[in-house]
Amino acid sequence: MKKQTRTPWRAPLIVSLITVGLFALGWWLVDDLYMPVLQPSGAIADQQLTLLIFTVVLSAVVVLPVFVMLVVFALRYREGNTRAKYTPEWSENKWLELVWWGIPIAIIVVLSVVTYLTSHSLDPYRAIESDNQTLEVQVVALQWKWLFIYPELGVATVNDLVIPVDRPVHFSLSADAPMSAFWVPALGSQIYSMNSMSSQLNLIADEAGTFQGYNTNINGEGYAEMTFEVNAVPDEEFAAWSEERSESGHVLDRAHYAELAQPSTMPDPMYMRLADTELYQYIVMKNMMNHSADDSDSATMDAMQHGGAH
Amino acid sequence: MEWLIGRLSLEYLPTDPATIGAAIGMPLGALVVAGLLTYYKKWTWLWKNWLTSLDAKKIGVMYIVVALLMLIRGVADAFMVRSHTAMVGVDGEGLFDADMFQQVFTAHGTIMIFFVAMGLMFGLINVVLPLMIGARDVAFPWLNSVSFWLFFAGMILNNIALVIGGFSSAGWLGYPPLTGLEYSPGPGVDYWIWSLQIAGVGSLLSGINFFVTIIKKRAPGMTLMKMPIFSWSVLVTTVLIIISFPLLTATLALLSLDRLMDMNIFTSYLGGNPMLYVNLIWAWGHPEVYILVLPAFGIYSEIVATFARKKLFGYATMVAALVAIMFLSFLVWLHHFFTMGAGANVNAFFGIMTMVIAIPTGVKIFNWLFTMYRGQIRFTSPFIWFLCFVFTFTIGGVTGVMMAVPALDYQVHNTLFLVAHFHNTIIGGVVFGFMAGITYWFPKIFGFRLNERLGKYAAYLWQLGFIVAFAPLYTLGLMGAVRRLDTYDDPTWTPLFIVSGIGVMIIGAGIALQVLQFVVSIWQRKQNLDTTGDPWDGRTLEWSVPSPAPEYNFAITPTVSRRDEWWYAKQETIRRPHKSEYVDIHLPQNNSMGLYIGLASLVAGFAIVWHMWWLVILCVVAIIAMVIMRTMDDNTEFTITGEELFELDSKRFTAGKAKA
């Protein structure tokens, strides 16, 4: 037991230094990597980045003192350091305890207010205010590809989402597959797309570019390959694109949809002319009707979509 | 034939080399162990001293042994996952096909939570809780053995999936409709359900057992507010278990109704709703996180006080914080799926409740720091684990608060950022805590200390490996990398996955050192013998008895008049009790019925997976019959007389003198 008095505190210190070194090295290495969450291309993702920085800085108010105290106390009060005080019975101090109940409470109060406000301002269901007209896109997660329907334009695509820059996009999302989730990190906010449900999401692209989109919720074997491209293009280009695609040779109707919905991965995008404008409503409602949904059901669907979860 | 073996057939045998290797290796390993036991004629010893023992300490050791073996399997799974993702980036091929990859990470998550973390937790509670509260035993010793064998049966069933049929590939919480009949008709999801069902019942029974133990079996004078803080953490955890585990059982039962009887509870047909499942499973799942971490908090509290040689700072606040966490943990489950599209107010409520939990947790960290303040800190290996914990867990806390803000969670949910976050809290909080606990209480059970040097090196490697493995995952998450990907296109992800794989290897090296630590410590046990029963200069009652702790724990039931009773008692002169103070005590006899019930549950689970209905019925009837038989048995105890106790206990005083 005698040996123990020479407390081996150097090793923890060395490990801490190596840790700091690793972080520095890592920081230097990842510097030129593209991180869409930290380099957003849309207003929503932009606000979310601000929120991210805010929470980290606010947490640092508690965390940094903890780390400093951890190192200082551990070194100073090591056994064998005769200069340090030793008060084995000292275990209560109302004022100190008030301080460390108080500080986290104050921080959490601030954060709670921010949480409440941003839950509303960044609510995925909330329409984005803009002078430009909102584009409606219906999204269906299939095993294992994304079907994008532009009901206003009479166009549908698979795994290629083309949107105009600076125009808000309202997505209605459903699935004809196990629960999936739609996420474009450069634009912000992911949301689940579920069988017989219609969830909503509002996004906007601030700059032209090609962004990667993902499914974030496992839905079977082809899950990892269920990625898609988002092409944000200027408005005129978008108009030309939709014009061209609406004359596409492929037609999307219920019969063709049934084929498309079969499990498969689809590395190359596909473009179709939308022949059935009620297709999305049909997909959402089909499991809830005993037989196939006919047109009279779309009124129910509209009611659900607008009243529903919100 | 079908009535006999259900849907079992040879086509379910594994086909890919990695699985075949494991499928042959595991039974082979078991055979080697069985062979050694036979060769050294140790079967009777194993049976009498361990398998049928109702001594909580021995049951605890069995839990820990099983959990450590499963830790090796879980880390091997993790290593395969990371190797695969690194290799996919290099050559586009990787180790597995998509389904196998998904099975591996599903097995990793399931095993780590249910058979490693839960196993270590119940193991340590069994080993130390009765000793700590001055009790001879748990409230229901036989039930305790049933719990262990159910845990064991669940573990075996989980591993059998590797040999025949394959495991679930739907993630560790198996959301329907993916886990429904339509999308997963095979036996994998059934293996997952029934291994958790069986182990889950064991956990519930254990929860009840320890709750009653703490309420009813404390030593005279030990009021609740004089209990060591670890006992408080266990009390709170058992309340969480008792309330939340029935939810898990019910949820999995509903899912199995969908699978066995096509009931459409969680499908989207006939009014079913998968969102209900997600709510139910997390209403269990979130308290589960605290079930694991609170006992670890308790361990840290004991360790800091002991190794700072100082009273725990703010005992009453610590208790208040534990109880606050207990209540709050039931009010946060929705934060696991902010992205499901609930309204802004619902999301905001659950986000704020989640942050509120950070308050009592933060307070606990400050209390630990101020326990160190003006102490005399010994940098022993349990204390090193504690230092690593504060560092790692605090970072996990920060990322946790980030994810608690719903609007921010939309950008990181289900990415590798989330994966890194929960490993931050579970490895940093739970695993480090249980490793510290094992090192700390090891001498109490085995009578010698573990090698300190190897223990510290292991802790350092875990810490470094953790950073190297998970810092890249945080980065990848911010780059858009989603969790559970078996393949990806972006070449800039590859280096980060490779670095992460190296991190897993470093953790693996840490585990190898721990194995070496056990071997070396057993080899050199004579040099590290604990002759005093109090090797760390401890504070609580378990250090007042000799090491290894006798089967009866305390020859004379201790009386308690203050917190840290043993710390103060040993500063006074310890009087040797008079012979007349030793009274006859009764201890539970060995009993093998728990083992048989576990075995029957295992067979029943296997039979359900493969639809062998006659066998299910047979096993269930057998289990009921065995429970009835046991309750009819009046001769379940044996007696140690006061005289014998006096003789046995005399060693304690002669040993103490020899040291003085």
Image (cartoon, rainbow, N blue to C red):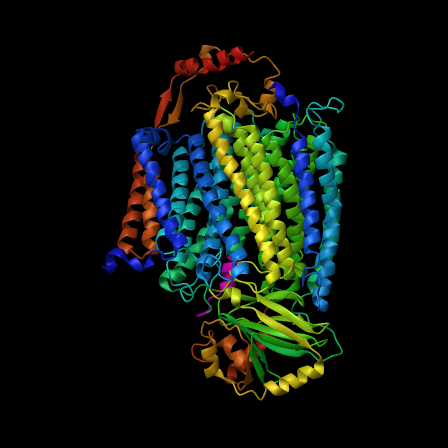
- Residue that extends furthest to the front in the rendered view of this protein: B91
Relative to residue A196, is residue B372 depicted above or below?
above
Q: How many marks?
A: 0
Q: Quadrant of the C terminus of chain A?
A: bottom right
Residue drawn where x is 51% and y is 73% of the image = A266
Q: Can you give x and y, in whole percent of width and height, for residue B64 in the image?
A: 46, 37
Let me know if residue B436 is in the magenta part. Answer: no
Q: Can you give x and y, in whole percent of width and height, for residue A93 in the image?
A: 74, 32
Identify the image quadrant of residue A116: bottom right
Let me know if residue B279 is in the magenta part. Answer: yes
Relative to residue B226, is residue A124 depicted above or below?
below
Do we see residue B220 in this rendering? no
Relative placement, left or right, of A291 versus B370 is: left
- Of the pair B411 and B367, the residue shown nearer to us: B411
Identify the image quadrant of residue B600: top left
Q: Quadrant of the N terminus of chain A?
A: top right
- Residue that extends furthest to the left in the rendered view of this protein: B1
Relative placement, left or right, of A240 versus B134 is: right
- Of the pair A15 and A128, the residue shown nearer to us: A15
Q: Can you give x and y, in whole percent of width and height, for residue A267 in the image?
A: 52, 72
- Of the pair B201 and B124, the residue shown nearer to us: B124
Q: Which residues are magenta?
A: B269-280
Do we see residue B427 in this rendering? yes
Residue drawn where x is 69% and y is 82% of the image = A237
Q: Can you give x and y, in whole percent of width and height, for residue B44 in the image?
A: 31, 29
